Image (cartoon, rainbow, N blue to C red):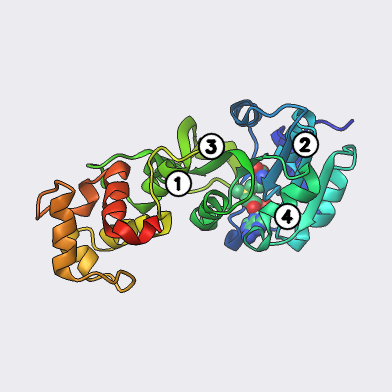
């Protein structure tokens, strides 16, 4: 078998052989550090019983390592130019399926049904940074069976996912991640672990999905509307933020009454609230209606 691609010399050889041109619009920064690869796979807790979805296999560096650890790997790649390269670099593996598609258009629930009999899959990726949030939100909010998501993201985004009130990075993404999953920062990764080098720092984060969310809400969609309205206008009080939101039907008086009923100060700012407080507000807005 050829040496694994995590070896930088082998990666450069493949890139030169195919005269591959990196496409910035696809967020292409290929990993060239086997220690980082091994850390990602260990953190994802991949075993031979697992089916893994890899988003954006690139030239197949992580795909090879995943195929050695997992039962099956399904890798979704958008770039036409990488498909013939993957055919060569993954030729020695019989447990990999490459799907040539845009991950944002793939039905992950169907994919889990087809390749894992509907049982929970693990998601592992060195993500294209330009679509980190839609990918993560799609995986968390969708109804696909997922055990954990272990991904390389921009360091600042990894921090945002774990933030608590008081930090300038605390926001709708922090709350959404914390509603669906337990975040754990696996490692910070410097730019020299990739070619080409990204101009931002990176980090590997693992999101272990909860079986049940840590807070109770009858209407999670309403809770997320409240969260978005609060952070869309961070400098405003919660009362003003919610009363100016186009997708919330409540009058200013109703909102003021709910804020008081929740035991919050009339001038509280939304960015100071934790997930449990947004859940409690959503319950109060729901009132009788959501219990029907
Ligand atoms: N996994 C490889 C590695 O670690 O070396 C490549 C990672 S690179 C950061 C991101 C990969 O995602 C690229 O291969 C890129 O072409 C692919 N990609 C970008 N947008 C995509 C999309 N919408 N759907 C699927 N793959 C995408």
Q: Nearer the viewer, residue 165 or 128?
A: 165
Secondary structure under tag 3 reads loop
Q: Which residue is drawn at the image coordinates 73% and 61% (left, top)?
A: 101
Q: Which of the image's four quarters has the N terminus?
A: top right
Name which of mark 3 and mark 4 comes first in the sequence.
Answer: 4
- Note whether 268 is above or below 147 in the view shown: below
The residue labelled by disc 1 is 200
* Left or right: residue 1 compared with residue 237: right
Q: Which residue is drawn at the image coordinates 38% and 43% (left, top)?
A: 216
Q: Please tell me whether mark 1 or mark 3 is closer to you in this view.
A: 3
Name which of mark 1 and mark 3 comes first in the sequence.
Answer: 1
The residue labelled by disc 3 is 211
Q: Nearer the viewer, residue 4 or 145?
A: 145
Q: Residues within 10 Å of mark 2 (few under 14, many from 20)?
A: many
Query: Could you tell me how far apart the alpha carbons at marks 1 and 4 are, in whole angstroms?
Result: 34 Å
Q: Please tell me whether mark 2 or mark 1 is closer to you in this view.
A: 2
Name which of mark 4 and mark 2 comes first in the sequence.
Answer: 2
Q: Position of residue 51 (x, y in %)?
A: 74, 38
The residue labelled by disc 4 is 110
């Amino acid at each position: 078998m050829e040496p694994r691609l995590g070896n930088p010399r082998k990666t450069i050889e493949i890139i030169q052989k195919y005269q591959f041109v990196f496409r910035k619009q696809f967020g292409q920064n290929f990993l060239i550090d086997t220690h980082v690869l091994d850390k990602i796979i260990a953190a994802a807790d991949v075993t031979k019983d697992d089916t893994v979805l890899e988003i954006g296999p690139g030239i197949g560096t992580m795909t090879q390592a995943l195929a050695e650890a997992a039962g099956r790997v399904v890798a979704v790649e958008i770039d036409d130019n990488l498909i013939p390269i993957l055919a060569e670099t993954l030729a020695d593996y019989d447990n990999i399926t490459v799907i040539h598609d845009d991950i944002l258009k793939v039905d992950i629930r169907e994919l889990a049904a087809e390749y894992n009999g509907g049982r929970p899959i693990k998601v592992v990726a060195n993500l294209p940074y330009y679509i980190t949030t839609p990918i993560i939100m799609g995986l968390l909010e969708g109804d696909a069976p997922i055990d954990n998501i272990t991904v390389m993201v921009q360091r600042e985004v990894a921090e945002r996912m774990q933030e608590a009130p008081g930090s300038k990075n605390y926001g709708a993404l922090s709350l959404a991640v914390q509603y669906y999953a337990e975040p754990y920062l696996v490692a910070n990764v410097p730019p020299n672990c990739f070619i080409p080098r990204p101009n931002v720092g990176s980090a590997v984060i693992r999101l272990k999905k909860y079986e049940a969310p840590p807070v109770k809400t009858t209407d999670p969609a309403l809770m997320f509307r409240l969260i978005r309205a609060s952070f869309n206008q961070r400098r405003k009080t919660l009362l003003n933020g919610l009363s100016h939101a186009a997708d919330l039907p409540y009058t200013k008086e109703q909102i003021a009454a709910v804020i008081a009923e929740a035991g919050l100060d009339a001038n509280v700012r939304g960015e100071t609230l934790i997930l449990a407080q947004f859940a409690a507000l959503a319950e109060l807005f729901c009132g009788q209606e959501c219990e029907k």
